[in-house]
Image (cartoon, rainbow, N blue to C red):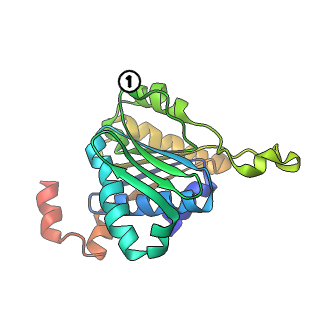
Amino acid sequence: QSIIQKPNKSGDIAWIAARASAKSYVLAVFACAKCILYPNTKTVIFSATKKMAGLIVSEKIKKELIEQSPMLGREIKDIKTNSQDIEVNFQNGSSIVVVYASDNSVGHRCSLLILEEFRRTKKELIDRVARPFQIARPAAYRHLEEYSDLIEEPINVYISSSGTSNEWISKLGMDMIRGYYKDNSSCLICMDYAIALKEHHITPKIVHVTSD
């Protein structure tokens, strides 16, 4: 629950977790909740592997979440999972679009940027291509004079499996911690295999083999 709520309280959040920690599932729940509760939320999932990121839409949202929640299905206008487009369009104008991490992906716009498996993407590419996607959510209330100055800051969610201390994600993690203690502008969440073991997603034998 705290993982789902935290991005709304901090502008930037990094979630680094071991495999089988239900990262994709929780991410799908958060993205859908954000899109439903905040109309016209434009979400981009930026990933070095479009096929893997596409599983968040085709497997987690389309097959799992909608099966578990028919009410979610009624909030969704259509879902595209073809070779060209992977996206979810909601009845209230919100959307989730999967974008391949490359120089050719410029031009997208989003108020929620999800950097999926970001440790596999060069930081320079994220800064140059993905971060410029960001815009303030085009909420309807902004057209009312009394609320015109209330502009929501875009949200960045970095999510990845764990890596090593010599990777660029290590510095990002330290920056997130500093931001949390300075002004609560960011947050770092780290999870090891304990959660996956507790939920019986994996076994101790699998952890041992993976560690080797």
Residue at the spot x=60%, y=52% of the render?
10
The residue at 62%/57% (across/down) is: 38
Which residue does the image show at 50% across and 50% down from the upper left? Answer: 95
Task: Determine crowd level at label 1: few under 14, some 14-19, many 20+ residues with C-alpha closer than 10 A.
Answer: few
- Quadrant of the rendered structure where residue 149 is? top right
In which quadrant of the rendered image does the C terminus lie?
bottom left
Q: Position of residue 17 (x, y in %)?
A: 35, 56
The percent position of residue 70, horizontal first and vertical second, equals 44, 75
Which residue: 27% across, 41% down? 83
Residue 22 seen anywhere in this rendered image of the structure: no
Quarter-of-image position of residue 58: bottom left
Work out whether 206 lies above or below 69.
above
Q: Nearer the viewer, residue 183 or 11?
A: 11
**Image-based side of 134 in relation to 67, left or right:** right
Position above or below: 203 against 140: below
Identify which residue, 112 or 63, lies in the foreground: 63
User: Measured along the vertical axis of the image, is residue 109 above or below residue 54?
Assistant: above
Q: SS of the residue at dot 1?
A: helix
Camera-side residue of 5 and 30 = 30
Tell me the residue that label 1 is attached to.
103
Q: Is residue 197 above or below residue 177?
A: below
Front position in the image: 205 or 136? 136
Q: Is residue 10 visible?
A: yes
